[in-house]
């Protein structure tokens, strides 16, 4: 019998599971993962009757439970009369997705193609970029930021079958410039807004885009809706290069409050949009956003066009400021809704338990999920959290992390 020696050039399950599973086991053993609870009026309740407020939920504007969004989902089901008319959309489709893409296109000021999730979008788009079919026709060197979200990093092996793939240090603009001098084309794959706080250096990257034609693939899932005029997100608010050289994807699952994803493109001809529909992995053969998700998204897009969006953003920012006034973190002062309250690797799980017992869920992150010495309790602020809840959480955090 022959044994197989894996190459592990771009992925390694032995390592990923070996490292990550211990983290999950320890979290679950301490009651901080694997929690099942019903949601009612913003409070979660387990079958055993423990009540808690979720401070690790990415629905930053609470649009996921907005009555208009729920009604939108129901209305679309009634209007289109089908949840998912199962056939590739490139052959036959009901008008639901086209209506949504027109609406999101107007909202974000881009040509929008929808996908069932940002993960599916990246898995499908990145190999098309690698082969030059999405871009300017030149096969680029694909540079993945070391910290890019797993939904993008997971596409490395399929990109590597089409072109050269490398990783770079977090936001290493100097390395990118070096590569731009050596390769006819470079594509940088990066989060527009990081899941542990912080934003991409869009202006510095724009300089490389202007000077060398660098293509940047941004995943702006964490800032869409929560940031910018009408919620257009961090990248599209600040990036001066909105043409073939910038591609942005964003989930509709987080602050947008629905389900699905938007791929935002500028300046690509219709034929390229067709290539995306026909060849971007699961976009071409798997189910698209279903009618309920489309209806909810149409309703959320409408909210984005009204002053209510600005009010919700203001409430979110006020909650972030209140939190910052009570608890120190590296992210304090930023408009970004995620904070990591530093706690040692040894005590972070116990601290997380204490906070949970006091009625708040915050997620502990610790080695090996993050580097040693950077452990902490991850807190996410939302527009719908009350001042009372935030003050109470901060008092508990102070006690739990004092030890
Ligand atoms: C949450 C998140 C995703 C996942 O989005 P889905 O639409 O659920 O696939 C992808 N990318 C980033 C950066 C995220 O934070």
Image (cartoon, grey):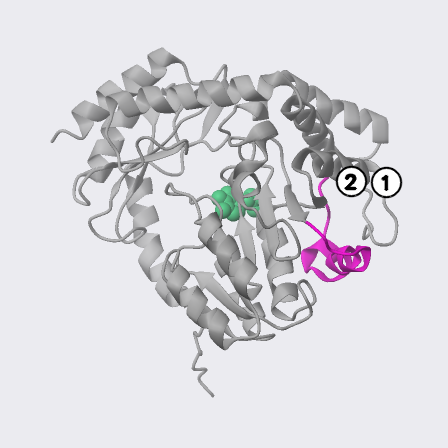
The image position of residue 21, as x and y in percent, is: 35, 54
Identify whether 182 is placed above or below 49: below
Whether residue 289 is in magenta: the answer is: yes
The image position of residue 108, as x and y in percent, is: 66, 37
On the picture, is 343 further left or further right than 75?
left
Magenta segment boundaries in residue numbering = 266-290
Viewport quadrant of the C terminus: top left
Identify whether 381 is placed above or below 269: above
| Local SS, label 2 | helix
Q: Residue at x 45, y 53 (%)?
A: 204
Q: Mark 1 packing: few (<14 Cα in 10 Å), some, or many (20+)?
A: few
Q: Which is more toward the observer, 48 or 304?
A: 304
Nearer the observer: mark 2 or 1; the answer is 2
Whether residue 273 is in magenta: the answer is: yes
- The outermost residue toward the right is 92
Q: Would you name the residue on which mark 2 appears?
A: 97
Identify whether 368 is placed above or below 252: below
- Tell me, for residue 94, which label it has, or none: 1
Q: Which is more toward the observer, 373 or 105?
A: 105
Q: Residue at x 63, y 43 (%)?
A: 261
Q: Do the residues labelled 2 and 1 touch (CB within 8 Å)?
A: yes
Question: Is residue 133 something that shows in the picture?
Answer: yes
| Local SS, label 1 | loop
Q: Which residue is drawn at 74% across and 24% down?
A: 74
Q: Which is more toward the observer, 204 or 31?
A: 204
Q: Residue at x 60, y 37 (%)?
A: 252
The image quadrant that residue 173 belongs to is: bottom left
């Amino acid at each position: 019998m022959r044994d197989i020696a894996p190459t592990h050039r771009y992925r390694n399950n032995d390592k990923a599971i070996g490292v990550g599973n211990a983290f999950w086991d320890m979290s679950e053993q301490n009651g901080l993962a694997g929690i099942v609870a019903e949601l009612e009026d913003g409070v979660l309740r387990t079958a055993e009757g423990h009540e808690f407020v979720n401070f690790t939920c990415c629905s930053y504007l609470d649009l996921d439970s907005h009555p208009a969004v729920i009604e939108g989902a129901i209305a679309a089901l009634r209007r289109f009369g089908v949840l998912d008319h199962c056939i590739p959309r490139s052959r036959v489709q009901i008008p639901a997705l086209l209506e949504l893409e027109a609406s999101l296109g107007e909202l974000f000021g881009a040509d929008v193609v929808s996908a069932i999730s940002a993960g599916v979008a990246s898995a499908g788009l990145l190999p098309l970029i690698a082969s030059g079919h999405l871009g300017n026709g030149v096969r680029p060197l694909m540079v993945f930021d070391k910290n890019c979200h797993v939904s993008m990093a997971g596409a490395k092996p399929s990109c590597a079958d089409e072109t050269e793939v490398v990783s770079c240090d977090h936001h290493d603009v100097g390395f990118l410039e070096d590569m731009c001098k050596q390769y006819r084309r470079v594509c940088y794959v990066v989060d527009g807004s990081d899941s542990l706080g912080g934003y991409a250096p869009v202006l510095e990257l724009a300089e490389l885009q202007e000077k060398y034609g660098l293509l940047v693939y941004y995943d702006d899932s964490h800032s869409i809706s929560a940031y910018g005029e009408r919620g257009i997100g961090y990248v599209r608010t600040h990036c001066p290069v909105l043409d073939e050289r910038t591609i942005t994807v964003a989930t509709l699952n987080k602050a947008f409050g629905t389900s699905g994803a938007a791929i935002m493109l500028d300046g690509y001809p219709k034929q390229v949009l067709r290539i995306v529909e026909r060849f971007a992995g699961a976009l071409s053969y798997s189910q698209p956003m279903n009618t309920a998700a489309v209806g909810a998204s149409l309703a959320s897009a409408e909210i984005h066009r009204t002053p209510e969006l600005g009010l919700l953003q203001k409430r979110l920012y006020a909650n972030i400021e209140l939190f910052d006034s009570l608890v120190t973190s590296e992210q304090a002062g930023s408009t970004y809704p995620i904070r990591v309250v530093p706690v040692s690797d040894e005590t972070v799980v116990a601290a997380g338990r204490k906070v949970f017992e006091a009625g708040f869920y915050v997620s502990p992150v610790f080695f090996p999920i993050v580097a040693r010495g950077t452990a902490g309790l991850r807190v996410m602020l939302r527009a719908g959290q009350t001042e009372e809840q935030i003050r109470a959480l901060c008092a508990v955090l102070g006690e739990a992390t004092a030890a």
